[in-house]
Image: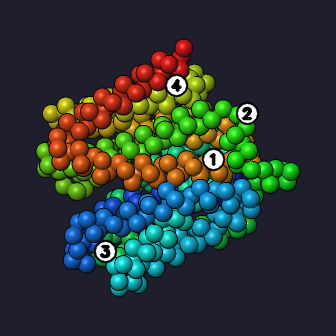
Amino acid sequence: MEWIRKLRNSPATAVIFASTLVAVMGVSLISPVLPAVQEAWNISEAQASLLLSAFTLPGIFLTLPIGLLTDRIGRKPILIPALVVFGLSGGGIIFISDFTLILVLRAIQGAASSAIAMLTVTLLGDLYSGEQRRVLIGTNAAILAVGAAGYPLLGGALATVAWSAPFACFLLALLVAVPGITLLEEPQRDENNTNSSIRAFLTGPTSMTPFVVLYLAIFGIFVILYGAQLTAVPFLLANEYHLSSASIGLLVGLPAVTMGATAMQGDRVLRSLTSFQSIALGFVSYGIGLVGVAVADSIYVVAGALLLFGLGQGLAEPITDTALNERAPDEFRGSIMSIRTSVLRLGTTVGPPLSVGAAALFGYRQTLLVSGAAAFLIGVTWFTVRRQ
């Protein structure tokens, strides 16, 4: 429709979508670079993986204070500096010759990334409502999926030039920050609510149950995504199918295709289902996809199962953002979405070691099988309960 096209092409949404593309670089661009980093610095695999851990950990603890601050002083005064810090701390790694200092810069960059990721979804909730909000949050999720699928290929290609080459891409954040100063709108705020206490909201008449359920869903989504899809599946493909890194990257990127296509239809989905039913079906699709990968005897079955996994991602992830935004009071939206980002970061941090630890005991096929069965049962139970 014409109004959808205009919304997606507006200057404000362009800055928000570009910020999303910047934030998702932090992990997906660098993951394929870890072997090159290990070789260049003559360090262990565990030490090289600290480039990812240093990036994700700060968000668990710092996103909530940042969210509280945005509810006090506004979104734009936080987002623009966060983009600048993200770009300079990431791009500055090119010039650093001490690995410990590199990890410090990655931690700073990770904190900025958490602020950006939280604020993009928060701004969509501030600036739009109803059908417009649902469409744009779905589009934002689709853009995130495109970045998550494409950046590993870009990072891997640049790493063949030099281990540090991919880090230059982070400077693109500055190209988003500069036009954002003039193009991004600061949402209107009710001055009577700026001094409202988040404690008053938490202890008030509003039921906290939907928020708790949504946060638990977000945690589960990202434990499954980072633990199963992005950790267990690549190891399974390497160990049992003996695929190259490039082939693994292509297969692991397949879920982004169906996720993006499904996320773009989020508004239509919510015309037929409640947000909780959509999330429940997402977990069902996760489960079938992971079980499919676990029992597959050919790479084509694996590919089909991963596409089904991506369908679940499209049904679950963007819908949680929509549901939180629609339930959040305007004066507390930043705080509520910051908790979402903290929980998200916790899931991304817990997922990989949990998956690898289980696989060390039972193997990757069994780990994926149990993970898939658990996700399926959670989804079916949740869907049944929410219909009653």
Q: Amino acid at mark 3?
A: Trp
Q: Residues within 10 Å of mark 3 (few under 14, many from 20)?
A: many
Q: Is residue 164 above or below residue 356?
A: below
In which quadrant will I find the C terminus? top right
Q: Earlier in the sequence, mark 2 or mark 1?
A: 2
Between residues 61 and 116, which one lies in front from this camera angle? 61
Q: Percent from the top left, x then y, of residue 321? A: 57, 41
Q: Where on the picture, by quarter, is residue 349?
A: bottom left
Mark pair 1, 3: CA separation: 38 Å
Mark pair 2, 1: CA separation: 16 Å
Q: Amino acid at mark 4?
A: Gln
Residue 165's label in the rendered image is none
Q: Is residue 342 above or below residue 221?
A: below
Q: Is residue 183 left or right of residue 309?
A: right
Q: Which residue is mark 3?
A: 163
Q: Residues within 10 Å of mark 1 (few under 14, many from 20)?
A: many
Q: How many numbered markers are drawn? A: 4
Q: Percent from the top left, x then y, of residue 229? A: 32, 44
Residue 277's label in the rendered image is 4
Q: Which residue is mark 2?
A: 205
Q: Percent from the top left, x then y, of residue 252? A: 31, 47
Q: Which residue is mark 1?
A: 336
Give SS at disc 3: loop
The furthest residue to the top: 388
Give SS at disc 2: loop
Q: Earlier in the sequence, mark 1 or mark 4?
A: 4
In which quadrant will I find the N terminus? top right
Does the CB distance between marks 2 and 4 fall below 8 Å?
Answer: no
Give SS at disc 4: helix
* Nearer the camera: disc 1 or disc 3: 1
Q: Is residue 50 left or right of residue 12?
A: left
